[in-house]
Amino acid sequence: MGLLILQLVNGITYGMFYGLAALGLSMVFKALGYMNFAHSDTIMIGAILLFCFMSYFSIPYWAAFLLTLFITMLYGILTEKILFIRFRKTSPITFMLVSMSLSTVVKNVALLLFGAFPHGLDFKFTDASFEIAGTRISLNNFVIFVIIILILVILQLFFVKTRFGLAIRMAQESPETAAAMGVNVLATRAATFAISAGLGCVSGMLIGPMYTISAE
């Protein structure tokens, strides 16, 4: 019984990681109608940068968390402004090939700088745990669950309660109508890529303390 509950908790935690990352992927797809195959690299970037800031620069977790999030969202904006904007009117196949090429470049740069061997991040949200049927279950999973729920609530409030969030939603539904109503569609595209990268980054930063981090 204890093992079943442990696997259930681990499965829910994995599902939260994948769901958060998939939400970022779906945002770009809804906005452009294209699949961004480089999105998965934001998970890797988030985990690696967090590890480097904490291990090499001794930055506390939450400060490293915010710094990594800022850098990764900036990365999302730059990839859209420098690369993807040039292919906004191209075919979906071309866009996907470009994103796959970017993914290859990012992975190889990460391998060159970080190495191919996995690294462990010596950090836990809490050392507390409880026992069920002889199986100990860490409360780290529940902390991560709460953090992800909080992020989703903040994101929902942003898209429902703020003017810029509503503008992003409008531009995703109908760019032509949004532009006719004075919405800066290019700015909403950049914001979409930034939020998308941020969601992938958060997923990587939360999974980093629980599992090994690798550039592969």
Image: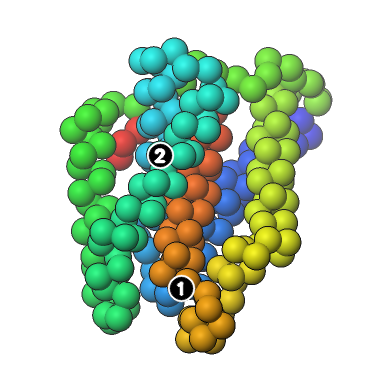
Pointer 2 residue = 71
Q: As shown in the figure, which amino acid type bears the numbered disc 1?
A: Val
Relative side of 177 to 71, left or right: right
Cα–Cα span, label 2 and label 1? 23 Å
* Picture disc at residue 185: 1
Which residue appears at 47% of the width and 31% of the height? Answer: 67
Relative side of 59 to 77, left or right: right
Q: From the viewer's perspective, is the residue at label 2 or at label 1 nearer?
A: 1
Seen from this angle, which residue lies furthest front? 182
* Picture disc at residue 201: none
Q: Is residue 65 above or below residue 102?
A: above
Q: Is residue 215 above or below residue 75?
A: above
Which residue appears at 47% of the width and 17% of the height? Answer: 59
* Quadrant of image for the C terminus: top left
Whole-percent x, y for residue 182 in the image: 53, 78
Which callout, 2 or 1, points at the residue further toward the start of the chain?
2
Could you tell me if residue 211 is visible in this image? no
Q: Nearer the viewer, residue 27 or 41?
A: 27
Mark 2: few/some/many CA within 10 Å (<14, 14-19, 20+): some
Relative side of 43 to 1, left or right: left
Q: Is residue 42 above or below residue 99?
A: above
Which residue appears at 81% of the width and 26% of the height? Answer: 132
Mark 1: few/some/many CA within 10 Å (<14, 14-19, 20+): many
* Quadrant of image for the N terminus: top right
Whole-percent x, y for residue 89 in the image: 30, 81
- Judged from the image, the secondary structure of the residue bearing numbered disc 2 is helix
Q: How many marks?
A: 2
Q: Is residue 216 above or below residue 165?
A: above
